[in-house]
Image (cartoon, rainbow, N blue to C red):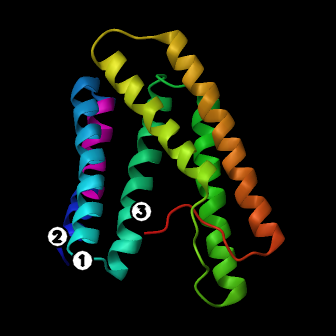
Amino acid sequence: MNLPNLISLCRLLSVPLLVWLVVSGHLAWAFWLFVLAGVSDAVDGYIAKRFDLRSTLGVYLDPIADKVMLVSVYIVLGFQAYLPSWVVILVVSRDLLIVGGVLLTYALAQSRPQVAPLWISKVNTVMQILLEAHVLATVGHGIPQPTVTALLCWVVAGTTLASGAAYLWRWAAGTGHFGDEAR
């Protein structure tokens, strides 16, 4: 356990608090915890690269912490009706598709599949984070922006569909590249 892995673990362990803050109606505090989690993700990556502290645990722990947080926030924002359910279903389904594809590739190949991020997936992740941050910030500070939220929902839907389709295409083509994160 090194410092970057400890930071990732703390980010993972903060997810229940983040969910509780949203469920309890403390979206402004949830927004700041979400921002802190984003900063911690950048910091752990920087420390791992700068001080050559990359590890096998970190390769898995960092993206798991990111995905658990992202998906948990989408689900709770959906249940609290801050996001339309169709966006939540789309985002969560795409992530399940990717995880299922990686596991299936692993099972069929009986070896560790090569996990390669796609450009569209990176764009999709940024858009998903922006939508969550926007909702947490605007609703949390009492200034909801329904038009901006709707626009971001459609952008997230488009990038999520494009990313999911790109991963399906790669997997079906048998390139051995199927996954969302590589560090």
Q: In the rendered structure, which amino acid carries the disc numbered 3? A: Ile
Does residue 2 appear to the left or right of 54 in the view shown?
left
The quadrant where residue 47 appears: bottom left
Q: Which residue is mark 2?
A: 3
Q: Which mark is residue 145?
A: none
Q: Which residue is mark 1?
A: 53
Residue 17 within the magenta-colored segment of the rendering? yes
Residue 33 image position (x, y, % from top left): 23, 39
Q: Which residue is mark 3?
A: 64
The quadrant where residue 171 appears: bottom right
Q: Give the answer, above or below, for where 77 lies relative to 104.
A: above
Label 1 close to label 2 by CB (< 8 Å)? yes
Numbered range of the magenta stretch: 12-22
Closest to the observer, 95 or 159:
159
Does residue 103 appear to the left or right of 36 in the view shown?
right
Mark 3 or mark 1: name the one nearer the start of the chain. Answer: 1
